[in-house]
Image: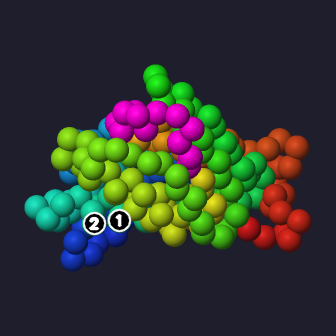
Amino acid sequence: MRQASIRRTTAETDIELTLRLEGGDVRIDSGCGFLNHMLTLLAVHGGLGLTLRCKGDTDVDYHHSTEDIGIVLGQAFAQALGDKKGIRRYGDCFLPMDETLVLCSLDLSGRSYLGFFLPMEAQKVGDFDTELVREFFAAFTRGCPGAVHLRLLSGQNTHHIIEAAFKAFGRSLRQAVSIDPLNAGVIPSSKGVL
C-alpha cells in the first residue's frame, strides 16, 4: 500500500498526518471547521485515506495552519508516490456544483506551478479567509511539485466555488496517482524521471 506519515512542528503549527493513496479512514482536525469540511471532501473524492491533526496559532488566524497543512499534505503525496513508476501522472475534472463549474487539471511533473483563477466575491466563509484557498494549493505544489490549474468557468457562491475546487482537486489527484496497467513499473516521462 502506498502511504506516508509525517509529523511537522514549527513555532506556528504542530501537524500529524497519515495518507493512504488506496483509501482508508478519513479523520480531519485542522482547528478550523470549514477547512475540515474541505479536506474531508478532498479525501473522499480522491479515494484517499487521510488522518490529520493540526494544532496551530488559530488565535492569530488560520493562515499558518492552512499553509502548513498544504505543505505537509503535498510532502505526504510525494513520499507515498516514491519514484512515481506506473502512475498515470495527469488528472483532470470538470466539477459542477449547482450554479458553479470548476475545472482542475494537474500534472505530477516534479515542477511546481499553480495556475489559480478562482475569483471569489466573499472575503470570508464563516471565519475562514477565502484568500487562504490559494495559499493551500500553492503550498501543496511546493510539497509535491507539480502543475495544478484551477479555473472557475461559472459560479457566484463563494462556498460553492471553494467546495467545487477541493472536490475537483481530489478527483484529479485520484486519476493522476492511479496505476496505469499499460505502463506498470514505468516512469511516465520520456526523460525517465519525474
Is 160 magenta? The answer is yes
Q: Quadrant of residue 11?
A: bottom left
Q: Could you say which disc has been placed on residue 44 in the image?
A: none
Q: Is residue 114 above or below residue 111?
A: above
Instruction: Indicate how the structure is coloured in the image.
Output: rainbow
Q: Are marks 2 and 1 in contact (CB under 8 Å)?
A: yes
Magenta-highlighted residues: 150-161
Question: Residue at 48% of width from left, 42% of height from top?
Answer: 165
Q: Is residue 113 visible?
A: yes
Q: CA distance from mark 2 to mark 1?
A: 6 Å
Left or right: 123 as drawn, with respect to 85: left
x then y, percent, for residue 171 = 58, 38
x then y, percent, for residue 25 = 41, 37
Q: Nearer the viewer, residue 47 or 25?
A: 47
Q: Nearer the viewer, residue 175 or 14?
A: 175
Q: Which residue is mark 2?
A: 64
Question: Residue at 20% of width from left, 41% of height from top?
Answer: 126
Q: Which residue is mark 1?
A: 68
x then y, percent, for residue 155 = 46, 33
Q: Which quadrant of the figure contains the C terminus? A: bottom right
Q: Is residue 85 above or below residue 172?
A: below
Question: Residue at 56% of width from left, 49% of height from top?
Answer: 150
Q: Is residue 62 above or below residue 39?
A: below
How packed mark 2 is, by other alpha carbons closer than 10 Å (few <14, some 14-19, many 20 or more), is: some
Q: Is residue 172 visible?
A: no
| Count of marks overlaid on the render | 2
Amino acid of disc 1: Asp
Question: Residue at 42% of width from left, 58% of height from top?
Answer: 134
**Element type at mark 2:** helix
Amino acid of disc 2: His
